[in-house]
Amino acid sequence: QVRLEESGGGLVQAGGSLRLSCAASGSIYSIDDMGWYRQAPGKQRELVALINKHDIPTYGDSVKGRATISRDITKGTVYLQMDILRPEDTAVYYCTLRDTWKGDYWGQGTQVTVSS
């Protein structure tokens, strides 16, 4: 069983910053990539950022230039730094991990609310 534990969400003012963390634990064979999606009320889940096993990041169009994803392999943790936050960044942020052989895993989500 794989567990993803997210932290760092909360209420932030527009223009501010936040840092989300996601720690993976359990029976992981090999991580293809790890990162974040988000879902706002009434909208589809969308990509925020992923980082693959070669440390190559991919960012969603809506956060390019404002988000930085990184990881600490020794801790099995991925981080998302988001700056210049906007009210439209308000969403539940979900951590995800893709295991080469076991497939996709998701965290329970952490709420990020950006006030104007």
Image (cartoon, rainbow, N blue to C red):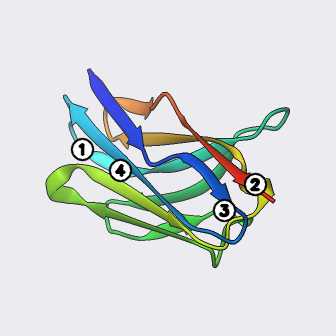
| Label 3: element kind | loop
Res. 51 mark? none
Dot placed on the residue nearer the N-terminal end, 1 or 3:
1
How many angstroms separate mark 3 from mark 4 (CA)?
18 Å
Looking at the picture, which amino acid does disc 4 mark?
Asp
* Outermost residue to the bottom: 65
Q: Residue at x 31, y 60 (%)?
A: 53
Res. 115 mark? 2
Looking at the picture, which amino acid does disc 3 mark?
Gly
* Residue that numbered label 4 is attached to: 32
Does residue 107 sit above or below 52 in this rendering? above
Q: How many marks?
A: 4
Q: Position of residue 90 (x, y in %)?
A: 72, 48
Dot placed on the residue nearer the N-terminal end, 2 or 1:
1
Q: Are marks 4 and 1 in contact (CB under 8 Å)?
A: yes
Q: Nearer the viewer, mark 2 or mark 1?
A: 2
Q: Quadrant of residue 6?
A: top left
* Residue that numbered label 3 is attached to: 60
Dot placed on the residue nearer the N-terminal end, 4 or 2:
4
Number of residues whose C-alpha sits closer than 10 Å to that of mark 1, classed few (under 14), some (14–19) or many (20 or more):
few
How many angstroms separate mark 3 from mark 2 (CA)?
21 Å
